[in-house]
Amino acid sequence: MNVYNYQKDQLVLKIVLPEKLSAIALWDLSSKTLLTTFHFPQPIACLVWDATERLFFAGSADGSIHQVNLFRQREDKFGRAAMEAVGGGGVNDMIRINDEDPQAAKKRLISVGQPVTTMSISLTSSLLLVGTATGHIHTYDIASHQLLRTLSTHKGMVITHLMTLLRPPDLVGHVSLTLAAGTETKEVPVRPIAPFQRMRDAKARDLHEAKRPPAGAAAQARVLELEAEVARLREQLGKAKGMNDTMWETVVKQIVHEKKDKVAANGQAEEDPEEAVRRKKRGRT
């Protein structure tokens, strides 16, 4: 019996059973009692524990990694969803990974395809780093079990230990590590924004760009010239509108006269609507 992993207030032991099944025993150091025993279908080669004590990963030499959740959801007596710890019943409380819910266990299984030798979890508990006997380092997303990246720099060597560190300040960006008052902070150099030139031809660009009006007396003269041009355009617009109205009235009158002449030629006089209504009333009586 070997001590495999140590936590703040718990102790994890590795036990190899005669049936060649590997078991992970979880002990409480304060009371020195056995909390839970987890049985796996393959012998466990390495183990990594989440810092928040929500789950742990157990890897084997056949390339399989089992995610074991230490809490599960259940319904209380009022039908509401509640969380409870897995196990905790003592020596007789044994949990077999693939026996309770094979479908859920399959979803929590990560198949690496290479013998797993060591594992590590990032400081944010979002990434799982897996070292293999072939020298590859795989990075998995813990939430989706998706393979994000594979490092093959140490190909041909056995990865025996992995550790995650904080990102160095020179890789974070422009940061200041001094918090003392009165310290001078250098501003981050900003690249100047140059005007975007669509045309390389200088003459075409000058014609395309809007020029500023000249200043002084020349500007006043230019303003007067523009006002005179606006007045002239308004006068021309009024004349055009008058001609349009005259043409419209002439055409309408001509059409009305032609219609009246056509009715008179056919011998059909236009009847007053009020007179037609009176005649209909007299006919009813």
Image (spheres, grey):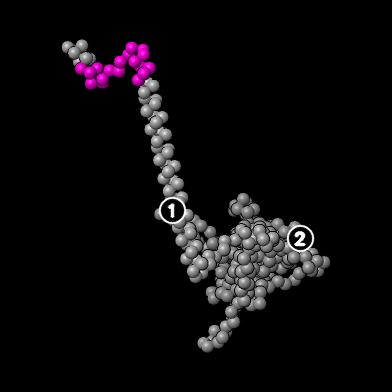
Indicate the quadrant where residue 141 lies.
Answer: bottom right
- The residue sitting at 62% across, 51% down in the picture is 102
Instruction: Give the percent coordinates (x, y) of residue 265.
Output: 36, 13
Which SS class for mark 1?
helix
- The residue sitting at 30% across, 18% down in the picture is 270
Query: Disc number at residue 231?
Result: 1
Task: Considering the whole magenta stretch, tell me its main secondary structure.
Answer: helix
Name the quadrant of the N terminus: bottom right
- For the residue pair 67 and 236, the one nearer the viewer reads as 236
- Residue 99 visible in the picture: no
- Which class describes the residues within 10 Å of circle 2: few (<14), some (14-19), or many (20+)? some
Amino acid type assigned to the residue bearing label 1 in the image: Ala
Going from N to C along the chain, the mark reached first, 1 or 2, is: 2
- For the residue pair 7 and 165, the one nearer the viewer reads as 165
- For the residue pair 17 and 247, the one nearer the viewer reads as 247
Q: Which residues are magenta?
A: 260-278
* Lateral position of residue 87 relative to residue 166, left or right: left
For disc 2, the marked residue is: 114
**Residue at the limit of the structure toward the right, as seen here:** 156
- The residue sitting at 22% across, 18% down in the picture is 275
Query: Disc number at residue 127?
Result: none
Number of callouts: 2
Give yes or no for residue 198 being in the magenta stretch. no
- For the residue pair 43 and 246, the one nearer the viewer reads as 246
* Lateral position of residue 162 relative to residue 181, left or right: right
Instruction: Give the percent coordinates (x, y) of residue 115.
Output: 76, 62
- Placement of 184 over or under 150, stated as above or below: below
